[in-house]
Image (tube, helix red, strand yellow):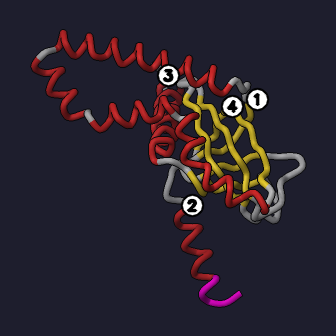
Amino acid sequence: MTMHDQGDLERQERERRRFFRIDDTVGLQLTPIAAADEAQMIAEFSERSADVGLLNELHAIRDQALPQRRKLEYKFPTVAAYTRVLERQIEMLAIAFESRQQNIVLKQHPVNLSAQGMSLVLDPPPPPGGLLEIQLQLYPEHNRIFTLGRVLKRDTGPTAIEFEYLREADCEAIVRHIHALQLRRLRHDNGLD
């Protein structure tokens, strides 16, 4: 291994630690992608991930309008309350649409999750360097995420997967989910639930 390779590995490790990780149980489906099919899967990623992550896109749009929403809540609380009802109705429609579109039941699986990737116990573990099609469902929000992840080399322990192709709205959904899960656990641990 050259000094350049060692520097790249250290940089990648620092990047992996950029996001907070948390133990969670998610709906999960992993599908290995043959090396010959990788280019086609990568080319189709944007279209396929948009079909799965509609709810995440809606949340990203809502978050972009947060300053206007705060002004509306201050000046016109009744209108803001009605807007929240409409947002919730749209979310319910998106959840129903996504579940009918996908028509896939994802098995629950314990993982250690971050917005950059996840680690989990798989038997047998997939080969290092392989690309996986990953479908995740976060609970209790029911956000679905479609991503492509690369299996990282591990000597022992759980299989580590880095999300190589992940839309920003999906990354933000994972970050929001982890943050909400932390808050719920803290409240529970402090007897506030």
Residues marked 4 and 3 touching at CB (< 8 Å): no
Amino acid at the residue labelled 3 = Ala
Label 4: how many residues lie within 10 Å, few (<14), some (14-19) or many (20+)?
Answer: some
Q: Check contact, mark 2 vs mark 4: CB within 8 A.
A: no
Place of residue 28 in the rendered image (x, y in percent of width and height, measured from the top left): 71, 36
Marks 2 and 4, how far apart at CA:
22 Å
> Looking at the picture, how far across and down is residue 159, in whole percent?
76, 53
The residue that mark 3 highlights is 94
Return the residue at label 2. Answer: 16
How many C-alpha atoms fall within 10 Å of the one at disc 3: few (<14), some, or many (≥20)?
Answer: some
Q: Main secondary structure of the magenta part?
A: helix
Q: Amino acid at mark 2?
A: Arg
Question: Residue at image x 62%, y 32%?
Answer: 137
Residue at the spot of label 4: 27
Task: Specify which label sits upstream in the sequence, 1 or 4.
Answer: 4
Give the mark, 1 or 2, whose residue is nearer the N terminus: 2
User: The residue tagged with tag 2: helix, strand or loop?
Assistant: helix
Q: Dot 1 corresponds to which residue?
A: 107
* Disc 1 + disc 4, Cβ < 8 Å: yes
| CA gap, disc 1 and disc 3 | 21 Å
Specify the segment rendered in magenta: 1-5
Q: CA distance from mark 3 to mark 2?
A: 31 Å
Q: Quadrant of residue 152?
A: bottom right
Position of 90 relative to 173 (above/below): above
> Looking at the image, do the residues carrying marks 1 and 2 touch, with CB atoms under 8 Å apart?
no
